[in-house]
Image: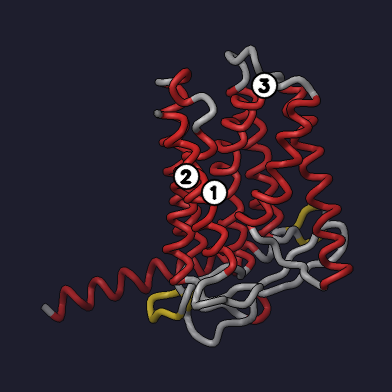
Amino acid sequence: MNHVSDCEFTATNLKTSTLQTLIRSSHNIRIFGRLYHPYHLATDIGILVLMGFSAWWVLDRSQLNFLAFIGAFLSMQAMYTIVRSLKYRIWGIAERSYIQDSIFILLPTYALTSVVLGNAIAPAMDLAALDLALGVTFIRVGCFLGGCCYGRPAVWGIKYQEAQLVQVRGCRTYTPSSLPLEPVIPMQLFESAFNLVLFIALLVWGLIAPEQSCGKILPTYFLVYGCWRFISDFWREVSARPRRAGLSEAQWVSAIVALVSSSILLYCFT
C-alpha cells in the first residue's frame, strides 16, 4: 500500500516539476533579442488560432462576412485598450477581469460594430461565444506561465519564484498576482481545459444543428461558464477586488450572468 502511495506521489512530483520547468523556460523566450513575456506569447498564439478558426467558420454562413468580423474584432480591442487605460489612470486598476470585461466592454462593442458593419447579430454572437471559449483556452495558459489567477495552496501545487512574477508596462501590460509563499493549485490550467472542452461541445452543436443552435450558443456558453466560474472561484486564492459576503466579484457576476442566460435559453426553447 505504501509502495502504491509512493509511486503516486512520485508521479505527481514529476508532473509538477515538468510544469515548473515549463514556467522557467517560458520566461527566457526572446524575439529579435527582446524578452517575449509568456502571457503575451500565449495570447498572441490564441489570437492567430482564433482568427484562423473564425475565417473557417464564416465560409458557409452567408449572414457573416469575415472582413466585417475583423472590423468588429479590432473595434472591440481598441475599446478595451481605451477603457483599461482609463481604469489605470483614474483608479490605478491594471488587472484584467475576464467575465466582467467580456460582459460590460468586449461583447457590447463587438455586437454594435458587427451590426453597423452588416453582420447578422445572432450568428455574430454565436461566433463570439466560440471565440471566447477558444481564446480563454490560450489566455489561461498565459496566466499560468505569467503567475496570475492561481489557486489556493496545495502540497502538490506549483511553486512560483519571485523572478517569474514580472510586471510589464508599456504598450502591452501584464500584472502578476502577489508571490505565493506556498505551492498553489494551477487553476489556470483547469480553466483552460474546461474552456477547450466547452469550445468543442459548442462547436459540435453548431455544426450538427445550425438552425437549432443559432442565437443560443452565447447564452449557453455563459450559462455553463458562469456555473463553472462560480464554483471554481472557491479554489482561487487571489482576486484584484475584495470579496463580499464570502464571494468574489467574479462569482457575483457569474451568478447573475448564469441566471440571465438560463432565462434567455428558457425563452428560446419554449
User: Which residue is at a point 82% across and 73% down the rendered structure image?
Assistant: 92
Q: Estimate the spatial distance between the alpha carbons at disc 3 and disc 2, rounded to whole Å.
A: 26 Å
Place of residue 215 in the rendered image (x, y in percent of width and height, measured from the top left):
54, 28
Q: In the rendered structure, which disc, 3 or 2, sits on the residue that comes first in sequence?
A: 3
Q: Where is mark 3, residue-wise?
A: 120
Three-letter code, disc 1 = Thr
Question: The residue tagged with tag 2: helix, strand or loop?
Answer: helix
**Image height of 114 relative to 64, above or below:** below
Three-letter code, disc 3 = Ala
Place of residue 46 in the rendered image (x, y in percent of width and height, measured from the top left):
63, 44
Three-letter code, disc 2 = Leu
Q: In the rendered structure, which disc, 3 or 1, sits on the residue that comes first in sequence?
A: 3
User: Which residue is at a point 80% across and 30% down the rendered structure image?
Assistant: 71
Question: The residue tagged with tag 3: helix, strand or loop?
Answer: loop
Q: In the rendered structure, which disc, 2 or 1, sits on the residue that comes first in sequence?
A: 1
Dot 3 surroundings within 10 Å: few (below 14), some, or many (20 or more)?
A: some
Q: Where is mark 1, residue-wise?
A: 137
Question: The residue tagged with tag 1: helix, strand or loop?
Answer: helix
Place of residue 119 in the rendered image (x, y in percent of width and height, measured from the top left):
71, 22
**CB contact under 8 Å: marks 3 and 1:** no
